[in-house]
Amino acid sequence: MFARIWIVCAGTLMASTVYADMPSAKLFLGNTSLPKEVGTGEAIIWRPTVDGLTRYQFRLPRSGVRDALKYQDSSALFYMSQTSDLGLQLVREQTGEIHVSVAPEHSSAKYTRSLTHELSYHLGVEFSSETARLSLGASWRNVTGHTQLDQTTATRTGNTVHVSWTRTKLSSADHLERLYSVSSEAGDFKARFGTRWFDFFQSADMLAEVGVDGDAFVIGAQIEREIGSAAVFFGAVSNLASGNTDFSLGVEYHFGKHTKVGATTQTGLISREVQSLKSLRRAALPSHWRNSVDISAGTIKINAP
Amino acid sequence: MMPRLLAFALVLSASMTTPASSQTAEQQMFLQANPGLAQQLQRQSGAQKSSGPSEGAGVPTSGEIKVLNADDAIADPSLLTQSRASNAREESVIQRYYSILTRDVLPIYGAAEFGQSQDTQLLFFNTMGKDYRLAAGDVLRVTLRGLTESDASYKIGRDGNLILPTLAPFSVAGLSIAKAETKLLDVLRYDDASATVYMSLDTARLITVQVSGAVKTPRTVAVPAYTPLSRVLAYAGGIKPTGSLRNIVLRDRDGNVNQVDFYDFLQSPEGANDPLVTDSSRVFVGNQGNTIAAIGFVARPGIYELPEGTASLPVGSILELTGTRILPPGVKLEALYFDESGLSQSREVSRSSVLKAGEVLSIRFLSTRLTDVIRVKGAVLEEYQIATVKDLSVGELLRGGAVLSEAASRDVALVISENDTSKVIDLERALDDPKFTLSSGDVLHVFTPANLRNIARADVNSSDSNILLGFVEAESAELFLNGSRISFIPLSAEDAFKEILRPFYRLTPQTSLDLAILEDDSGSARAVSLRSLLLSSAPFVVSAGDKIHLFENQFLAISADVLTSDPTQEIVTQKDDDATWTEFSQLITRAGVMRVFIDDSLRALLPSSENPTLALILDTLGFAGSRRFSDLVSVERLTSENRNILQLKSIAGDLEARLPEKTRSVTLYTQSGKEELLNKPDSAQFEELTSKALNLYINDEQVQLAAPSDLLNPDSEISQELSSQDIYPLFAIHEYFDDTEQFWKKDAVSLSDLRSEFFANKIEPGDRITAFTRNFLFELVNPGSGSGSGSGSDALQQLIGLQIAGSDIEEEVQSESQRRLGEQRPANAEQLAQKNASAPETSAYLQFILSVSRYVSGAVERPGYYPVAGSVTLSQLLSAAGDLTQNADTTRVEVIKQKVNGGKIVADEVQRFDLTKSDASSLRLLGRYSVNVPAFINDVATGLVTLAGEVQRPGEYLIARDETLHDLIARAGGLTGVAYPLGAVFTRESLKDSQRESNMVLADQLEQSVLQVASSDVEGAGEQVTAVLKYAGQLRSQDVTGRLSVNVALSDVSGPVYLQGGDTLTIPKRPSHVSVIGSVQKDTVASYSADKRLSAYLAAAGGSSRTADLKRAYILLPNGESTSADEDSIIPPGAVIVVPPKTDRLTVLGLTDLVSRVLGNIATSVLAINNVR
């Protein structure tokens, strides 16, 4: 049993073999592959990936894996493993991702797929005021700090080109992240600075942003809460120049790992569009573990998130 | 009137009779001269006595005459029987007369002859002589043969005719039977020529005889015909004492008178004149004539009647009359008589002299013993005597011993000679020795052992046995056992003692072989050993009057179990007889007996004259070779008051030496007795002993009293005590009294010094030697280094330092100051001594000991201070310190010299010795120094680590310096299948202190903060304060574990975990619970399940309490780490969920964080302890 450790990654969209970054363990990962000998050494290395990013590395002791199989319980293995914070790293997503968003005035559907670690493209269709436009864009991202991710995206939708640059920086204590975004679309310039406090109240996060929208100052805030695969949020954005305040209520739902459908009453906060690093916090590791490690029938399956 | 007159006459007659019965001598003489008067008197008194009718005496002569024959006498025996009166014994006047003269009642010669009772049956066998003439009354038996045959008896009729049936009566009267037969035959022959006749007297006729005169019952009696006169007199009751035997007259019917002198009849039956009485005869007995008496050495003493008409008789005739044929030589003939004045007199007479009537012939013959004989008496078959004039040897006398009875003792006999001198002889020897003779007149007494003993035991003053007197007066010795004489012993000069003793006393197991007392005639006594006496074959001289005293052990009460049984038992069992005891006591004093005491109780008496050795005494007591006794022996002189110790001896050393002269008492001490003595240091005996003995103290306790000479004897107890492994050899204290200074002084000596001749010469009785056990001394000078508390050690360390620092003075001066110090006993030392209860006394020596102590450090068994006396070798000092350990680096042993410089002790030079090259026993250390032995550097064994729990081979592992935890686990075979590596508890001693300290600090901080809260009176803070204070208290009391969080599954998590000595790794079994503590309803240990989340466990604990701060709840992991707790948290088995209390009210004081830490620490400890359990 000891040597026969099988780690199978199962894709949800396609049953393809994926590669997890486990060089030192020389692991061969696959969901349906026949059992194969894993390399020697006392530990197996696993880095959970979220949204094409990875930060922490687990070194799973073989003896721990053996015990976990024996007792059908991986909780001890979790703590027996050595968890190292290697900083953010980019991982090429093997599968594409579909994101559907529905709002009263603006709906869209988008399919994104990585080309390399850094570069990805996306295709989509947007509906607004009874017109539907195709969109095509590319995105470039890179890690600019231990926990800082920059992303530049250019999208052409119909005739308009939308260019944006975002930055996410996770605080060192992991209790908040700062979100920066600058975008220009058809001459409209928008800039936002937001902060998301994790677990602001109970399990709800608080996101607040300030920014300029052309020549008007905008402030906004919203409460976010994840409930299982769903996430709801409620917020308000106020345009200090016009004095308008829009309240927004939205729901998002993840179908599997790569399909996300969202519906909002208003467009809401722009900072919300910036990629969050919440899942890459240490505090999220147990959650990843729960979601990824499946022990049943004598095998441990570690799914790449 | 008639009766009155009769009574008067009776009284008168009585008054007349009384004087006659009490006649005086004169009257006797008078009566003797006038027999008639005497007869008259006699008759008178006889009439009085037979005043009643005559009782059945004979046949009455009055009335019808009847022809009687013997058949009638058979029908009526009273016809013949004597009167009863004849049996009454009477003393006649003449007898009384002679009794006055001779002081003896003499019989009247012949009187008894006729007073004898007649057998009536004999009557009918009167022999009828041929002269028997038939008369009327006779019955004839007639047998006829021939033609007519008949066989019948026929009585002769009164007419004298015999009538037969067929014949005419024919007269037979006056015929003899033969004649009658012839006459009848003649008649018959007429008709029948063949007729024959046989005739015999069938029954004789009875005739009547009148008996009168001086007979006792005068009367007429019927007697068979042809009865002799002498017998007839008997029928009349015999002749009265006053009657004559020489003057009896028989007158027959025809008037023929026949005077009979019965003396003839008595003297000579041959020619006796005893006529037959005929019918109608008369017998008259006349009165007694003159009498004379004979007494003394005569054949028939008695009263004799003189022949009729004579008044004197020659002595020769008297002798003849009395039947006295011999007169032995030397016989003395005397006549006794009353002189004129009536006084009884005597005169010597000769054979030819004539005695007058009334006189008494007295023949005095002095019977003499046979003196020419030797008598043998006692234990012989029959006592006998042998007549001899010459001396006989004992062998001859006793027929070579054949006459002795079986029980006769051949060992001793007593000869009492004629002149009453006596002699005790050895019979056995005398039998064999022909020269040993007895003279005539000697009496040889032979004894059985039993009667010999009885004689020996008898008291000479209360016994009238001439044998005992003979023994006492004889030239003999006496043998005493237990104070009582058991035998007399013949004198001897040639035999060995055992030969002398053997016949008289058999040695028994009870016999005390050790003591015998020989006492001579003059009373001087000496005590000797019975054993040596018995063993000696030299002649032992037994002189007259010697007394040999033997004793039995029981008497002396010497027995091997005496010591064990009753310690109060005295040697001589108290006798009931105080006199015996007193005598014995005097005897042993006189004999100079040596008394042996054991533990103050008299246990043995031994002869002191031989100056016995201790070995002999022990042997005597039966304890030779026994270790029961201590070495100590005190040799004493006895005074009137008590015992004075002359000197002390040692069983170990002086066993074979003779005790000194005048030793009268020796005291041995048993081990227990000596210990008892040592426990009573106040007793006078102890004081006396200590002043004579060498006193050995070990530590502060006196353990030995010994003879000073014992110190040099390796076998002595004191030497053995000192050579015990426990005794510290390099240092002891010798205390002695300095006579010149009159003060006690002390020296430091080593044990080897103690055993030197030099020291032995120096030692004096009464000196004290204090030795120390290694441990005691070590504890004393190194307090706190061992098990002792460290409280006193600082003070003592200072003292040691002070002592060493201050000892910059000259040696002698220093010792003086030390003595002063020792006497004063500094206050701190005294306190120290009180604390150190094991050495209360020795601390008086503490300063002294410390001043000579040298420090040994490094790789020795017991580093510390060691006192030394004088110079020691390096090896000795190292040995004192328990010797080098295996780790000692002997190539570089350091001796650090010190010197005194300017009032300071400073280090001098450091000398290094390579003991592999130089001999430590040749390196002599002097002066001040300390020694250090460096240890090897050890990289291989740096400590012990304990692996416990679920490892394959749990236990203690010796670890190398660079060994890691994971190496060790691998060495232990890895974990077992049920191990729970996450719960591994790795503790380190060194962390405990810091943990404890931090816990304390934390608790202090918390409490101080809470105090401020209490004073700040924040609203609603009370409840939280209480909760917080509870945690502070818990933290203080919480055990710390010194836990270090390690990952035993991954070796390279945080680099190698190097081990330290004392580390402990405990791998628990996989638990199946999760604990929930803190602000929950109840601290709970919930069962684990992989599916359970935080809320489930909280629910198991009854939910969180009102003060719970769930937001700050965290999970304490089994490995000691913690993580915040939320619903997503992974909770492994064995985890502890900690729910802290709300501290929002206290936040203002910054307590929140503090409380968390406190709680965390508590939980961590709880967790570790749980895991280890």
Image (cartoon, grey):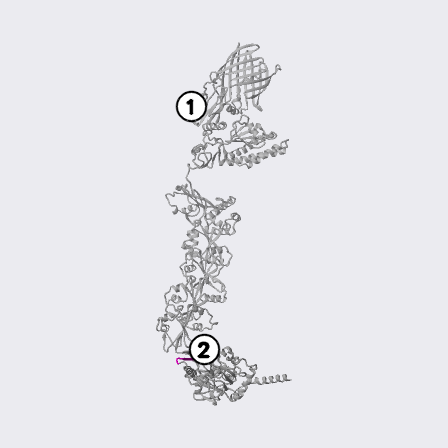
| Vertical comparison of B1102 with B373: above or below | above
Q: Which residue is mark 1?
A: A36
Q: Residues within 10 Å of mark 1 (few under 14, many from 20)?
A: some
Secondary element at image label 1? loop
Judge depth for marks 1 and 2 and give the one in front.
2
- Return the x and y of residue B1036 as percentages of the image width and height: 56, 36
Secondary element at image label 2? strand
Left or right position of A139 against B885: right
Q: Residues within 10 Å of mark 2 (few under 14, many from 20)?
A: few
Mark number displayed over residue B152: 2
- Return the x and y of residue B160 as percentages of the image width and height: 47, 84
Q: CA distance from mark 1 to mark 2?
A: 176 Å
Left or right position of B78 against B710: right
- Return the x and y of residue B323 as percentages of the image width and height: 43, 84
- Return the x and y of residue B729 as percentages of the image width and height: 43, 49
The chain carrying label 2 is: B
Is residue A176 something one can see in this rendering?
yes
Q: Quadrant of residue A194?
A: top right
Residue closest to the eye, A295 or B319: B319
Residue closest to the eye, A98 or A244: A98
| Vertical comparison of B659 with A52: above or below | below
The boundaries of the magenta stretch are B193-202
B197 inside magenta stretch: yes
B982 inside magenta stretch: no
- The secondary structure that dominates the magenta segment is strand
**Furthest residue to the front?**
B191
Instruction: Pick the quarter of the image with the N terminus of chain B.
Output: bottom right
